[in-house]
Image: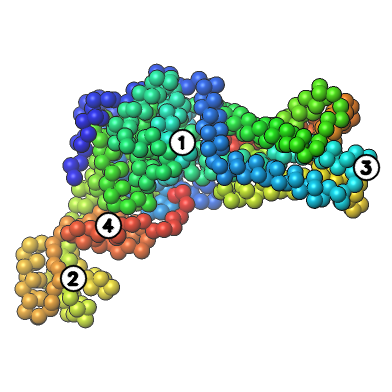
Amino acid sequence: MSTVAAARPIPRPTRPAPFAGAALQITRRALLKYFRSPEIFGMGIAQAALFLFMFRYVFGGAIHAGSTSYVGYLLPGYVATIVLFNGGAVAVGVAEDKAQGFTDRLRSLPITRLALVVGRVLADFTTNGWWILFTAALGFGYGFRLPGSTLDALAALGLCLLYGLVFTLVFIVIGLYAPNAQAAQGMSMIAFVLAFLSSTYVPPSSMPGWLQPFADHQPITPMVDAVRSVLVGSSHGLTTALIWSVVLILAFTPVAVIRYRHA
Amino acid sequence: MDKPQSRGAGGSTSSLIEARGIEVRYGKVEALAGLDLQARSGQVLAVLGPNGAGKTTFLRAVATLVVPSGGELRVRGIDVRRNPAAVRREIGLAGQFAAVEPTMTGWENLELVARLFGHRQAGARAAAAAVIGLLDLHEVADRRAGTYSGGQRRRLDLGASLVGAPSLLLLDEPTTGLDPAARAEVWAAVRRLVATGTDVLLTTHYLEEADELADHVVVIDHGRAIATGTPAELKARIGRDVIEIAVVDAAQLGIAARFLEAVTASPAVIDRSRRRLQSHAEHGTDQLSAVVAALKDAQVAVDEIALRHPTLDEVFFNLTGEHPHDALPTATKPTATKPTATKPTATKVGAS
């Protein structure tokens, strides 16, 4: 029997954790987990670089994207939708926390449920933001050059980060509904397919007639097109993209909050 | 084997948990169907039941993770439905899976949860240090939890539920999946904790665990409490002792059973694969010597013969008509219990 136990009682906290403090602890833990998992982080880097390489140098030669060079067409779309590729890890992380009892532990602690959601969103938005910045930088290495001013480029980057937030919420919800990590990974593939059925890699006008209406009207196409417009200083399609973003945020946030309350 | 003594100080008679007719359904499944349960502070309460009985659901209700659709549930007098936040300040939960972060060290894991319990940085450090001492985690605390053994991971998980110094610790099957040595480590940790005055509610399907740790046992089945009492009281319900015989030659099981029944006037249960048979004995020692003599006369070669009290397993079987865990014979040896016999089955029905 331990005598240490009697010598050092466990101190009891005097007040519950403040909202921001609790959220930041949850963020910190999720980020530590992410960046200390080489299989997630390292694979993400390799994947982003290799896919861009493939599109740029393998498919690029066969794709005609109008007057611009293919890398000029591809890169804005690639950066805007990179989260759809790497966001599967978000869904997997959320599903794992749920399956392994970590979410239950958090829900049994004296912190508000909203802090769980905010902490999680903050962490995943940070990792997704990193991927956006990383692929944008990567693009320049693959020969992408800004078609407009630096200010336009920053605005386009801001727009991509907004999409990063939108997709973060979508993947968190996928993770909350997935019964396990494998299912979360599988369900995330759907988002990935959406990127292909949009204007991200090829102009929808090159798709068969029956597919074009879908490609034109699903949210990814206007979102990607708006980034291309903003890059050249135009605001064409920006309103549609912003409306989609706001609608998706408003739709997925309450689902995430409710799911964290009751899951 | 010294069981923690009930603690007298600090209102040992105050109510810890009061459950009146609580109901929880998952779709069409009625996980709790009007469960009644009373527990006082100062006792270790074990909730015992087969898979799917509702043990975990009950624990989750106490932990404010599921809201009962009917009935009333109070923890330290606090209504769980009306004021879950106040209940959360009293409890620490260690769930069925060790919910520690493998990429973080023991210290980091403990300090994280301590901060979430409301500690400031220095307080979190102090709480983590105290828990590391209490659970004997010194040697591994600087390593990432991913490198821990199963028992170390469980102890760290237990530690994480303790850094906020909760007054009620909730343990959901704390030793499921652990080998005997690791189970002993976790049991020792729980005993030390109980000695510091923390109340404990645990679920288990190991009767041995309830016997080892609990002052008070509630057996639940199909979402209701079907028996309650101390381990000794529950065993006394069956009352009669058991004579158990192992024969050398399985072919002699039949003849041994006839002699055993003749002495005890009670049916013998034969376990052919283990060459064992047993029967209840009203007059333990007298009947034991009579059986020994009879078998000797009949030249039945006996490997082992013993008189013993009924195990909690048998009590459990008697109450629920089910074995507490699959693929395990009801009878355990009166002498050393073989560790292999108490290993959990590999697959389990999900949250019960």
Element under label 1? loop
Calculate the distance from the C-alpha at mark 2 to the C-alpha at mark 3.
Answer: 88 Å
* Relative side of A145 to B88, left or right: right
Residue type at mark 1 is Met
Calculate the distance from the C-alpha at mark 1 to the C-alpha at mark 2.
Answer: 51 Å
Label 2 sits on residue: B246
Do callouts 2 and 3 point to residues on the same chain? no
Q: Residue at x 50, y 20 (%)?
A: A18
Tell me, yes or no, if residue A251 can be seen here.
no
* Residue A172 x, y percent position in the rendering: 63, 38
Q: Residues within 10 Å of mark 2 (few under 14, many from 20)?
A: many
Q: Quadrant of residue B194?
A: top left
Give the chain of mark 3.
A
Give the chain of mark 4.
B
Q: Are marks 3 and 4 in contact (CB under 8 Å)?
A: no
Calculate the distance from the C-alpha at mark 4 to the C-alpha at mark 2.
Answer: 19 Å
Element under label 4? helix
Q: Residue at x 35, y 42 (%)?
A: B152
Label 4 sits on residue: B339
Label 1 sits on residue: B104
Q: Residue at x 17, y 59 (%)?
A: B335
* Relative side of A247 to A231, left or right: left
